[in-house]
Image (cartoon, rainbow, N blue to C red):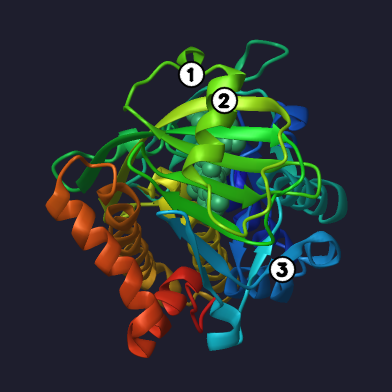
Amino acid sequence: QRVPVVVVGAGPAGLTVGNILRAAGIDCLVLETETRAFIERRPRAGVIEEWAVRGLERRGLARVLLERAQRHTAFEFRFAGERHRFEYTALTGSHHYIYPQQFLVTDLVREYADVRGGRIRFGVRGVRLRGLESDRPSVSYVCPDSGERRVVQAAFVAGCDGARGVTRAVLPSGRVRTARHDYGVGWLALLAEAPPSSDCVVFGMHPSGVAGHMARSPEVTRYYLQCPPGDDPDNWSHDRIWTQLRRRLAASGARPLVEGRLIEKRVLDMHGYVVEPMVCGRLFLAGDAAHLTAPIAAKGLNLALHDAFLLGDALVAHLSRGDDTGLSGYSAACVAQAWDYQEFSQWLAELYHGTASGDPYRAGAAVARMRRLFTSAVAATAFAEQYLGIRTSG
Ligand code: FAD
C-alpha cells in the first residue's frame, strides 16, 4: 500500500493535518491506538486562543465550535482573600474560546472521515517506522481485528502521537536535543460535574498551594490543586478536595463554589520539554510529540494547532506545487513558538507556586510579579499578549 502521508495519532494535531491534506485532495492515512468513541470522550484542554480558532475557521474546521464555544475576556488572580481581575479583552480586543478538547476532536474526526473522506484506522497496535531518511519511508502497524501486520509506504510521516507516542523515540539521539524542565510540583487535575463558579479562569495563590478554576461547559468545570509530585489521587477524598478548593480560592465578594461529583481525578507532575529539531528525514513531529507544556498557562492544545497548520500547509505546498519553503522552515518556526510558550509557562509557574514554596524570598517576588500587572500598563499589555498568544500567522 502507498499513500502520500501517514499521520500517526488522531489528536488535535494529527486530525488537523489530515483535514488540511484532504481539503487539498491529498490522500493520507491516520493511525490511532484508541477507539473513535474513546478519543471523542477524552477530556483534556478547553482554553483555545482566538488566533487558533481563526486558523481553524480559515480551514473550514470551526463551524460547530463557533456555534457552541463560550468566550472569555478576563482572568482573575486571588491572593490573601482579595480578587484581582485582569480584563485582557478590554486591553487588547482579543479573547479566548472555551471549548472542551473532546468536542474539538469529535468535530475534526467527523470532518476528516465522514465529510472529507479521509482514511483512519482506530485501535492499531505496534506502530513502527522504517527508512525515514530514505525517500521511501514506511510505517507498519498491527490491525486490531486480524492481528496481521500491515506495511504502508509513504512520502512523509507526521508524528502527532502525543507525549507517550512512538515517533519521537525514533529520532537519532545524537542529532536531536531534548530540553526538559521539571517544576518540582504536582497538580491534582479534577473535572467536576458542576457549573463554573466564575465567568473566567481563576487562580488562587495560597500558602497551601495554588488552586485553579476553568470553565469547560455549562455543566462541567475543571479544577486544579497543587500537590506533591507523584502524589496518589486516592489521598484526595471528595471532602478534602472541596475543602481545599474553597480555602485556596476564597476571596471577598467571590461567588461560592458550586460543588459536584468528581468525574476525573489525576495527578500531573508539572514538567515540560522541547525537542529540537522536530524533523528527521521524512518524519515531521507536531504537537505534544515534539514539545510538552505543563497546563500552567493552557498552551499545549494551542501549540499543537500551531504546528498542525504549518505542517499541513507545508505538506500541501510540497505535494501539490513542489514548493519546499514551508517544510524547510517548519522546525525552526515551531520550536521558536514552543519556546515562547514555555517561557511564559515558567514565568506564570513562579507566580503561582512562589506563595507556597516555603521560601519567603520567592513568595515576596511572586506577589510583586502579580501586583505589577495591576500597576504598570506596559506589564499588563505584555502579560495579556502572552496569555492570549496573539499571533498574526495561523
Ligand atoms: P494528543 O492529544 O495527545 O493526541 C495524540 C494521539 O495519538 C492520541 O489520540 C493518542 O491516543 C494517539 N497515540 C499515542 N500513541 C500512539 C501510537 N503509538 N500510535 C498511534 N497513535 C498513538 N492545552 C491547552 O492549550 N489548554 C488547556 O486548557 C489544557 N489543559 C490540559 C489539561 C490536562 C489535564 C491535560 C492532560 C492537558 C491539557 N492541555 C491543555 C494540553 C493539551 O491537551 C495537549 O497539548 C494536546 O492534547 C496536544 O495535542 P496532540 O494532538 O499533540 O496530542
Q: Which residue is farthest front?
A: 252
Quarter-wise, where is residue 43 in the image? top right
Q: Which residue is drawn at 28% across and 49% down?
A: 355
Q: Name the residue under label 2.
A: 265
| Marked residue nearer the N-terminal end (3 or 1) | 3
Question: Is there a contact, CB below 8 Å, between mark 1 and mark 2?
Answer: yes
Q: Is mark 1 within 8 Å of ligand 1?
A: no
Q: Position of residue 124 (x, y in %)?
A: 62, 23
Quarter-wise, where is residue 9 in the image? top right
Q: Is residue 135 above or below residue 145?
A: below
Q: What whole-number distance in Å separates the C-alpha atoms at marks 3 and 1?
A: 31 Å
Q: Mark 1 points at which residue?
A: 233
Q: Which amino acid does label 1 sit on?
A: Pro
Q: Is mark 3 on a helix, strand or loop?
A: strand
**Location of the C terminus (image quadrant):** bottom right
Question: Is there a contact, CB below 8 Å, between mark 3 and mark 2?
Answer: no
| Marked residue nearer the N-terminal end (1 or 2) | 1
Q: What residue type is labelled 3?
A: Arg
Q: Position of residue 174 (x, y in %)?
A: 13, 42
Q: Which amino acid does label 2 sit on?
A: Lys
Q: Which residue is drawn at 33% across and 64% down?
A: 344
Residue toward you, 289 or 356: 356
Q: What whole-number distance in Å separates the C-alpha atoms at marks 1 and 2?
A: 6 Å
| Marked residue nearer the N-terminal end (3 or 2) | 3
Q: Is residue 126 above or below residue 160?
A: above
Q: Residue at x 67, y 16 (%)?
A: 144
Q: What whole-number distance in Å separates the C-alpha atoms at marks 3 and 2?
A: 26 Å
Which mark, by number, is residue 71?
3
Q: Is mark 1 on a helix, strand or loop?
A: helix
Please say whether residue 107 is visible from this viewpoint: yes
Please say whether residue 5 is visible from this viewpoint: no
